[in-house]
Amino acid sequence: MPPLARYLLRRTLWLLVTFVAAMLLVFVLVRLVPGNPVDAIVAQMTRGGGGSGEQVEAIYDNYMREFGLDQPIWQQFLVFVQNVLQGDLGTSFAQYPASVNSMIAQALPWSVAIQLPAIVVGWVVGNALGAIAAFRGGWFDKGAFLGSIFATSVPYYCLAIILLFVVAVRMQALPAGGGYSFGLTPEATLAFFGDAITYFWLPFWSLVIVFVGGQAVGMRSMAIYELGSDYVNYARGLGISDNRITRYIFRNAMLPQLTGLALSIGAMIGGALVTELVFNYPGLGTLLFTAISANDYPVIQAIVLLITIAVLVANFLVDVLNGLIDPRIRAAQGGDR
């Protein structure tokens, strides 16, 4: 078998094993959360003392059967795996009979719309800033490095709270929270987009500033490392032009940054969930927080599993990309002698 094919097969097997383990962990950990969701539902339905003890017990048993919680735990897991493989994420406990698929379909576009632009803009600006700082050096390098270190050290939610207080509360320049104005319904119109974009900027900047700092620090470090490499000194000794050497340096320094970009996009679904809570943004973060508060097993399982799948797929694609680009990986598999 060719070395590259052997490498890809090994990565595929690891992906499948990790996915099965992730499903098991998600299923078990969710059920370790204290409290029974059916108890909360029945207590809310019978609030005020309505219904006799037999009626309450009948309601409780009915919900336990409806949600499959009366079955042995191993049987519940097999049903969960079967439904996941069929693309069915179940029915919400807290918002019964709402489908988890539809709930995620409504929340996911909001998370993607705010995090994907932040990741792309942050990656481009951060890498450009880090590369320029490494090549220019001097006061520009010191200022860019210190600023980037400060930006990447600030947690997303801290910067979100600062921007919320300064821009929304004090300056009242942008809305304080939400995804669109009260009374509107999400629709594909310019009027709705113009309204929603005003709610977009604060969470966007709270994400992109931190991401720019992290990318700039990483790119600067890699560029400085490449500048001191033996092949750079050898190329200069051969009289190769600085422009050509710079292209080599930039290409080599970009390899780990491309890996970081792919992983960031993969983790995008679960990234900065707390930021969405700070701004009450109608994304997966808010949905997950609501589900945890209500012990809504299917919703929690679906979101955590979605995050896990996205990260696993991103890691797999990065491995494939590195195997195709980097000859050292093929050499490690025995292909290059």
Image (spheres, grey):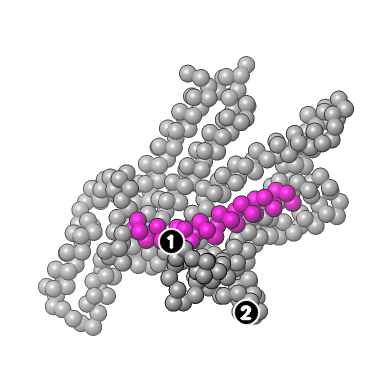
Locate residue 272: give its quadrant: bottom right
Q: Residue 107 has which mark?
A: 1
Residue drawn at the location 20% of the way across and 53% of the way down: 71
The residue that disc 2 covers is: 172
Q: Residues within 10 Å of mark 2 (few under 14, many from 20)?
A: few
> Which residue occupies the extreme bottom position in the image?
48
Residue drawn at the location 27% of the way across and 65% of the way down: 96
Q: Of the two numbered discs 1 and 2 on the same chain, state the one appearing first in sequence.
A: 1
x and y, in percent, of residue 304 in the image: 42, 54
Q: Is residue 82 left or right of residue 282?
A: left
Residue drawn at the location 80% of the way across and 33% of the way down: 244
Helix, strand or loop at label 2? It is: loop
Q: Residue 141 in magenta?
A: no
Q: Residue 113 in magenta?
A: yes
Q: Residue 152 has which mark?
A: none
x and y, in percent, of residue 102 in the image: 35, 59
* Three-letter code for the amino acid on which mark 1 is drawn: Ala
x and y, in percent, of residue 210 in the image: 64, 59
Query: Is residue 153 in sight in this rendering?
Result: no
